[in-house]
Amino acid sequence: MSLQSYRRVVGATLRLSLLASGGVFALSAATPALAQSARQAVRSFDIAAQPLPGAIRQYMQQSGVQVAYPADLAEGASSSPVKGEFGAAEALSRLLSGTGLTFRFTGAGTATLERAPQSASGTIQLGPVQVQGDGGDYGIPASMTSDPNATEGTGSYTIRQTKGVTRLDLSPRETPQSMSVVTRQQLDDQQLISVTDALRVVPGIVLSHDDSDRHFLYSRGFSTTIVQVDGLRSYDQDASASFLTQVDTVTLDRVEVVRGASGLLKGVGNPSAAINLVLKRPTSELQGYASFSAGSWNRYRGEADISGPLNKEGTLRARAVAAFESRDNFSDYYHKEVQTYYGILEYDLTPDTLVDAGVEYQYSHTDGSTYGAIPLFWSDGTRFIAKRSWSPSSKGAYLETKSRKVFVDVKHDFSPDWQARVRLTDSRLIRDMLVRQIYGSIAPNRQTGTATIYNTTLDPDRKAKGVDAQVTGHLDLGGWDADVVAGYSWTRGVLHRTDAYKNETTLLADWDGQIAPLQDWTGATVSARRTMERETSAYATARLRPLDGLSVILGTNFTTYKLRDVVNSVLSRRLDENGKFVPYAGVVYDFAKNLSLYGSYTQIFSPASVYGEDDNLLDPVTGDNYEAGIKGEFLGGALNTSLAAFYIKQNNVAVAIPGATTPSGAQAYEGADGVTSKGVEFEVSGEILPGWQIQGGYTYLHARTAAGSRVNTGLPQNQGKLATSYRFSGGSLDRAMIGANLTWQDATYYATSYGTAKQGNVAVVGLIGGYEVNDHLSLSVVLNNLFDKTYYDGYGLYTSYTYGAPRNVLFTARYKL
């Protein structure tokens, strides 16, 4: 690493340390009573007798303690009044008096409800309140933030509830569709630093690393462009989803993935998958950490995260997060630096109204970046084989990315059964890119030793705004229970970009990355583009329970979508979809204590974000999505399993045309009708034994065109993934953690006009380990690609390929308050 880079790393690390220490000082000064446990601190309570769910919500607001419980546990129960000065434990005990329920603390500021034990005669036995630490027992501790589904601090690889599929708070077992969650614990254990890293461990997701900084996402045979942040659509036009995968996970509580069509989440979507990035929220108690990492290829990283209340009452809370990273990689000329900052304030405006506001900013700069990768072929059809370290790029190439997001969120409880929420977002993504590299779409000539150099500049600038307003509640429909959500969302995005490209020829023998950037752009192809998207959607979902053990979920999105694409001042594409009706239906039947059968259906409507050879956007994709399966929930929700079968039929699916480009040099696509995708997915996530966490799954995919040929042949038909960790408790290995991860896929191929490239089965293994030196300091290590497997991490796009990373290691030391 250069002296200049070293100074930047050291300086950034010092700034992060100052941020953490300054935050600790500020929070400690503002809250001198924070050293007391939340359950011991005396607070003022004023909670009237009422249905238990509403009383619990008021208790959490007034105590700062987060309480978790299964929804059916509180059905029909009413609380006792609590008024006066009490500790949190005593107040909760008074509130539950007469309900037949008891509680236990699972952490300093978290508790869970459970049924009180009964004697043989049926009388309730109320023993002492149990206060429990983080390890040893099954179950998922409660959230320490205003997000009841937060995974931070749970120690789990699964989630108790999520809105990620239906917008209703449902457990994975109650959700009639395939879903996965990468929790905060898994992100930390496996050192999944970017969203790309996180998605690599998700069953059913395939990532294609198509150049130095972009990863395209695929699921069930098709590309994924829907990326949301806290449930609102982010900038995904112009394949920006591939850049969003570079988002740093230091700001996230979890990554949620819904496989299949996301008809209830977005009226505009596709049948592959939808990604939802859920941001961290301020905690009810002071907590924080600072960490430093070092690893292969001059990788250095610093993080700081501080959170807690800013006043004695705990009604004003804040969180500040920052990270800095500097690294090379195994590819020549490559160097990247990333800075990430996130801040959020949260305020209890009234006992029933919560307001939060935040800002997130990320900056990255890559030298030696590529747009495409190593050529797949020589012009005579033989394979172009290069060393893993060989780069088609030059030292003058670069990519600079800036992203900024501001949001405001207001939640209000009208009653114990009805809540409203309004969320506003404003975001911007700016990229500046200069590429000078060997071009794969025009194969190098072996006889002459010449190759085409692709010179291009790109400067996309996308601004987006969004609003989502919804109400949720509970209805009694003549004896039928119904949970409902209804709302309205509006998003608008405008993309400005000017691309210029010009090809030239060079001798490969002269290519050493030192060639200066092109000075004469005379004759270059220039494309100035302005793309405007606007989507409005009215949506509603209802969960009916006509019989014990039977749930029926009905919903719809009523969507209006407009797109205007102007190229070089000429309207090249206009799309108006007015009142597009996207229905959804699902059913879940509990046929055993821990098992449920489910089925679901939704329609597909997805405007294209890729272009044909004429530089026009393709027509929208339409079709139908069916899914059925069986789900299991075990050990009090600590372990979830799912076995699903799916069938998808679509028209106008975007298929890459081998070797073809648009006038601006980008990959060209064509639409295909009658494309079907069917398959089977299995997944398991959570704690299988005390201290042993696991997430893994298997996917079989059969995707074919109407003519019977295979779709996206570069994607595997069989795929398996496993990530696991085990924490020792007691004995000589007390406080130690070990784990592993495995990804496997079967053979793939990619046919071009030059020839066909193939890759056999690929299995990549990694190991993890950690040790808690004491209650504050912990050490961890991640070893990736243990057996140094040589494989393609992506190939096909621009008739090029990228290698997967060789064996590498990352060491981390973390100090927490």
Image (tube, grey):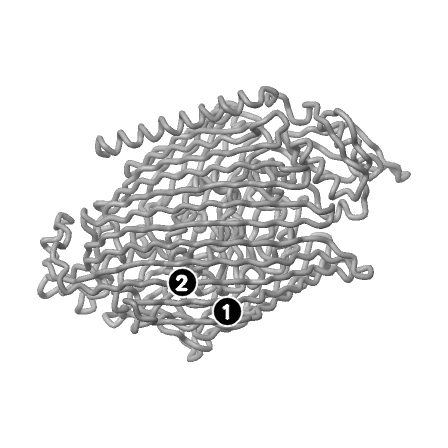
Residue at 23 percent across and 52 percent down: it is: 434
- Please indicate, yes or no, whether residue 626 appears anywhere in the rendered image: no
Number of marks: 2
Residue 532: numbered disc: 2
Q: Is residue 756 left or right of residue 637?
A: left
Q: How far apart, in angstroms, are the residues tagged by discs 2 and 1?
A: 18 Å
Q: Amino acid at mark 1?
A: Phe
Labels 2 and 1: the sequence-earlier one: 2
Dot 1, crowdedness within 10 Å: few (<14), some or many (≥20)? many
Q: Secondary structure at mark 2?
A: strand
Dot 2, crowdedness within 10 Å: few (<14), some or many (≥20)? some
Residue at 10 percent across and 58 percent down: it is: 507
Front residue of 554 and 447: 554
The location of residue 519, given as percent across then percent down, is 12, 54
Q: Secondary structure at mark 1?
A: strand
- Please indicate, yes or no, whether residue 509 appears anywhere in the rendered image: yes
The location of residue 811, given as percent across then percent down, is 38, 33
Q: Quadrant of residue 558?
A: bottom right
Mark toward the viewer: 2 or 1: 2
Residue at 50 percent across and 38 percent down: it is: 344
Q: Is residue 684 left or right of residue 272?
A: right
Front residue of 54 and 301: 54
Q: Kindly identify which residue carries mark 1.
A: 605
Residue at 65 percent across and 32 percent down: it is: 64
Q: Amino acid at mark 2?
A: Met
